Image (cartoon, rainbow, N blue to C red):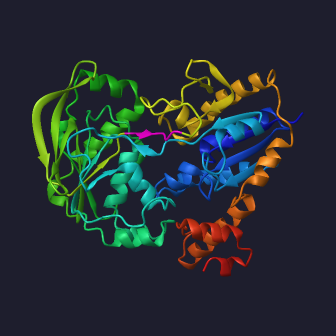
């Protein structure tokens, strides 16, 4: 009997799971559910527009989704359009691959002031997520970004880049127009640890130094390495490259810094409180000091940065999926080797998880492949002894769904975005409004007419 599997989430984690499952079980039939009208998840809505190389991952995901045996079902939300119980009754197994979409909170006084933003919310806005607001208050001349990972670099780079240098990307029109009005002059990138302990990738860090009309400023005093830092750069080549890059920037003659925009990198500072009454007027940071193992402790010495906005990029959390166990303390689905665990700690038959909702928001996009492989192995092992569902059950469920955007519907959206982009001399211009996306998905007129 042909196994029928449902995967919830059509981002990299879900698509990689479908690809591995088709390879291991060639006759499997997979229904890939996605709550948004378009697939690709993090690649479409979480990668900076100025990173077309990473966005090319969409091409590999496209190849998987067009293969026989994989059916794309977008614009279907679990909990409102179909319940998890209905999915489990209609499929031999269900894999949850919905990722992580929420910002972790700073948990300090003033964090909820107007002008204090989550990096994930900002990324969703500039990437044209259908559920993001269309307006964003880019009105501060001085801004703080808190974090030491690649998302912090993405947010900082997008904030500091001149709008005319983004015109070749796929950013939506309203985002481009907002960046045109951005009065940014100074951006403070605030990092809790030292230069040898950041989580940036060397390539993304170096990108800061390639921005037109942007100076990168590093205090040489903050690059003095202790024994722990010396060990880190001796053992890890990427950290060695990062420190070398920072040292190059620190050695630049201040007299040659004439750019209209500046990025200030600050190390050994952790957030203490966001300042302001009616809105953000600054941020108070506590200096930190590492011990011999690199562990950070506060020093009770505080520094104030006068800024009009604060962006926190200190990690993501997953949203619960209705009908699926969720550990609020860690923000992910409890599991063992991808098998979702119930309240008693035992595996729930036929229910699995992969990607960031399974292991937390760690690792690059490609690392979800190994994660998906383990989950698929668990599923295949269990499938051999599981009572199978009726082959017609999934077909009956699909017939009950309304407003579904299938593969052909997505191709029509894709064609419309490419046509809009061609008018501007770029590969695509992203369509944001959900209703417009759905209209394009069902519009069978010509591409040129469809794009208007």
Q: Is 16 displayed left or right of 222 in the figure?
A: right
Where's residue 3, x and y in %?
Answer: 82, 35
Say left or right for 49 vs 336: left
Left or right of 392? Residue 291 is left
Q: Quadrant of the C terminus?
A: bottom right
| 13 shown above or below 436 | above
Residue 110's place in the image compared with 300, above or below, is below
Q: Position of residue 318 (x, y in %)?
A: 48, 39
Q: Position of residue 19 (x, y in %)?
A: 72, 41
What residue is shown at x 65% (from left), y 53% (from top)?
Answer: 76
From where the camera sits, is residue 77 visible?
A: yes
Q: How many numbered callouts? A: 0
**From what the image shows, is residue 406 above or below residue 7?**
below
Answer with left or right where residue 22 lies relative to residue 45.
Answer: right
Q: Quadrant of residue 91?
A: top right
Q: Residue furthest right?
A: 1
Tell which of 9 and 209 is nearer to you: 9
Say above or below: 23 vs 216.
Answer: above
Q: What is the residue that sits farthest to the left in this orientation?
A: 301
Q: Overall secondary structure of the magenta stretch? A: loop
- Find residue 204 and report its horizontal and vertical position in percent: 41, 47
Tell me where the magenta segment starts and ends, as one range: 315-320
Residue 187 among those drawn in magenta: no
In the rendered image, is residue 207 in sight? no
Q: Quadrant of residue 141?
A: bottom left
**Quadrant of the image occupied by residue 214:** bottom left
Which residue is depicted at the point 45% across and 59% down? 132
| Quadrant of image for the N terminus | top right
């Amino acid at each position: 009997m042909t196994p029928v599997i449902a995967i919830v989430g059509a981002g990299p984690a879900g698509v990689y799971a479908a690809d591995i499952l088709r390879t291991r079980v060639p006759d499997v039939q997979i229904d890939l559910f996605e709550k948004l009208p378009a697939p690709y998840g993090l690649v479409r809505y979480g990668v900076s527009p100025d990173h077309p190389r990473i966005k090319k991952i969409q091409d590999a995901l496209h190849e998987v989704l067009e293969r026989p045996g994989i059916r794309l079902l977008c614009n279907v939300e679990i909990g409102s359009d179909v319940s998890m119980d209905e999915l489990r009754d209609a499929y031999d197994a269900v894999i949850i691959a919905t990722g992580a979409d929420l910002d972790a909170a700073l948990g300090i006084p003033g964090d909820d002031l107007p002008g204090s933003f989550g990096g994930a919310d900002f990324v969703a806005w500039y990437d044209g997520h259908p559920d993001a607001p269309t307006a964003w208050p880019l009105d501060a001349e001085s801004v703080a970004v808190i974090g030491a990972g690649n998302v912090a670099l993405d947010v900082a780079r997008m904030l500091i880049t001149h709008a005319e240098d983004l015109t070749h990307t796929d950013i939506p029109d309203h985002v481009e127009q907002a960046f045109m009005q951005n009065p940014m002059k100074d951006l403070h990138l605030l990092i809790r640890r030292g230069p040898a302990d950041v989580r940036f990738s060397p390539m993304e860090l170096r990108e800061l130094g390639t921005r037109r009309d942007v100076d990168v400023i590093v205090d040489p005093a903050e690059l003095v390495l202790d024994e722990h830092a010396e060990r880190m750069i001796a053992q890890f080549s990427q950290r060695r490259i990062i420190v070398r890059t920072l040292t190059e920037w620190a050695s630049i003659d201040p007299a040659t810094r004439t750019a209209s925009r500046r990025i200030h990198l600050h190390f050994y500072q952790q957030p203490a409180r966001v300042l302001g009454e009616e809105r953000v007027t600054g941020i108070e940071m506590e200096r930190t000091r590492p011990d011999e193992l690199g562990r950070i402790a506060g020093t009770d010495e505080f520094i104030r940065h006068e800024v009009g906005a604060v962006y926190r990029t200190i990690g993501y959390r997953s949203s619960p999926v209705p009908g699926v166990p969720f550990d609020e303390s860690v923000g992910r689905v409890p599991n063992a080797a991808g098998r979702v665990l119930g309240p008693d700690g035992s595996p729930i038959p036929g229910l699995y998880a992969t990607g960031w909702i399974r292991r937390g928001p760690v690792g690059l996009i490609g690392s979800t492949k190994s994660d998906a492989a383990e989950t698929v192995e668990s599923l295949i092992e269990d499938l051999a002894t599981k009572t199978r569902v009726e082959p017609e059950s999934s077909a009956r469920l699909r017939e009950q769904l309304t407003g579904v955007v299938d593969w052909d519907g997505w191709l029509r959206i894709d064609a419309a975005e490419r046509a809009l982009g061609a008018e501007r001399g770029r590969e695509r211009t992203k369509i944001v409004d959900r209703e417009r996306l759905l209209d394009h998905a069902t519009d069978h007129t010509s591409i040129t007419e469809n794009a208007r």
